[in-house]
Image (tube, grey):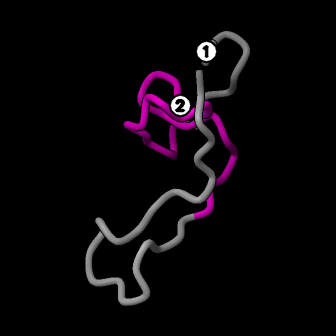
Amino acid sequence: MNQSTQHVNSKIRCSVESCSYHTSNYCTLDSISVGCSDAKVTASKDTECNSFRKGQ
């Protein structure tokens, strides 16, 4: 993601470099959707970013 053409949202930290919305350890979206990967969520590892889109 080219930081010069994308808005960096400093309120959403992101470490997923393979996401097309990732730049400089932040997300470029205005907001994200968080979901769960298990019906019985008991820890943060059971959650996921539903806004993820595979980057290049």
Q: How far separated are the C-alphas under marks 1 and 2? A: 9 Å
Q: Position of residue 27 (x, y in %)?
A: 55, 37
Image-quadrant location for residue 5: top right
Task: State left or right for residue 3 relative to residue 17.
Answer: right
x 43%, y 87%: residue: 39
Q: Are marks 1 and 2 in contact (CB under 8 Å)?
A: no
The residue tagged 2 is 22
Image-quadrant location for residue 24: top left
Q: Main secondary structure of the magenta part?
A: loop
Tell me the SS state at disc 1: loop
Mark in front: 1 vs 2: 2
Image-quadrant location for residue 34: bottom right
Q: Is residue 27 above or below residue 43?
A: above
Whether residue 36 appears in magenta in the rendering, the answer is no
Whether residue 13 appears in magenta in the rendering, the answer is yes
x 59%, y 28%: residue: 55
Check the picture and name the quadrant holding the C terminus.
Answer: top right
Q: Position of residue 15 (x, y in %)?
A: 37, 37
Looking at the image, which residue sits at the far bottom?
Answer: 40
Tell me the SS state at disc 2: strand
- Circle nearer the N terminus (1, 2): 1
Provide the residue span drawn in magenta. Answer: 10-33
Q: Residues within 10 Å of mark 1 (few under 14, many from 20)?
A: few
Circle 2: residue type: His
Q: Is residue 16 above or below residue 30?
A: above
Circle 1: residue type: Gln
Q: Is residue 47 above or below residue 29?
A: below
The residue tagged 1 is 3
Q: Residues within 10 Å of mark 2 (few under 14, many from 20)?
A: many
Check the picture and name the quadrant holding the N terminus.
Answer: top right
